[in-house]
Amino acid sequence: MVDMGKVVVIVAVLAAIMATAIIAFYVGRPELPEINLMHLYFSHANQTYTQAENISYWASYALRFRGTSVEFSTEIIVKDESGKEVYRNPVVRKCLSVTPVPSTPRNHVWECTGTIRSETFALPEPGEYEASIIARAGESCDRVLDTLRVVG
């Protein structure tokens, strides 16, 4: 004969294991939209420029979202060695839209890639500068930075 107390304990343990697995699954998932920036690339591979030479840089991004459209913003900032901003692209807001086919699941996660580029600019003073790109989508924010040098 089966002891009902043991059955209740076994069912309770299995329910607790399933609840823990479900919570771990959903807690481990990132909130969407989610944006990730890759490495910074410069128009000169050695990241060294002469005074008043045209400079530009860029980074690739991967964006994940649900729904049919998503907005994200980017900032491009260059700071000198003291931390003072010497160049800033205005904040740019972008919107990506997708047109799902009828068979697309309602909660489908879209993944898009692209490139964020600075405008061409020049830095008249020699020195070392910190260049960065910041991207925001919903609660997600990512930043990449690197240094560049301007020589006399």
Image: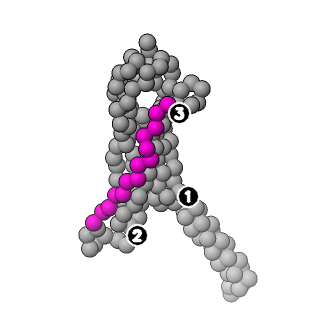
- Which quadrant of the figure contains the N terminus? bottom right
Residue 85's disc number: 3
Determine if residue 39 is in view: yes
- The crowd level at tag 1 (other Cα within 10 Å; few <14, some 14-19, many 20+) is few
How far apart are the two marked residues, 3 and 1, measured between alpha carbons?
37 Å
On the image, numbered disc 2 is attached to which residue?
A: 107
Q: Say above or below: 145 vs 70.
A: above
Whichever of callouts 1 and 2 sits on the residue coming sooner in the sequence is 1
On the image, numbered disc 1 is attached to which residue?
A: 28
In the rendered structure, which amino acid carries the disc numbered 2? Asn
Residue at 46% over, 38% down: 88
How far apart are the two marked residues, 2 and 3, measured between alpha carbons?
41 Å
Residue at 40% over, 18% down: 51
Badge nearest the viewer, 2 or 3: 3
How far apart are the two marked residues, 1 and 2, measured between alpha carbons?
17 Å
- Which quadrant of the figure contains the C terminus? top left
Task: Determine if the magenta segment contains residue 98.
Answer: yes
Residue at 58% over, 30% down: 83
Q: Residue furthest right?
A: 5
Q: Which sits in the foreground, 66 or 3?
A: 66
In the rendered structure, which amino acid carries the disc numbered 3? Glu
Whichever of callouts 3 and 1 sits on the residue coming sooner in the sequence is 1
Residue 38's x, y, as percent? 42, 40
To which quarter of the image does residue 8 belong? bottom right
Q: Secondary structure at mark 3?
A: strand
Residue 6's x, y, as percent? 71, 79
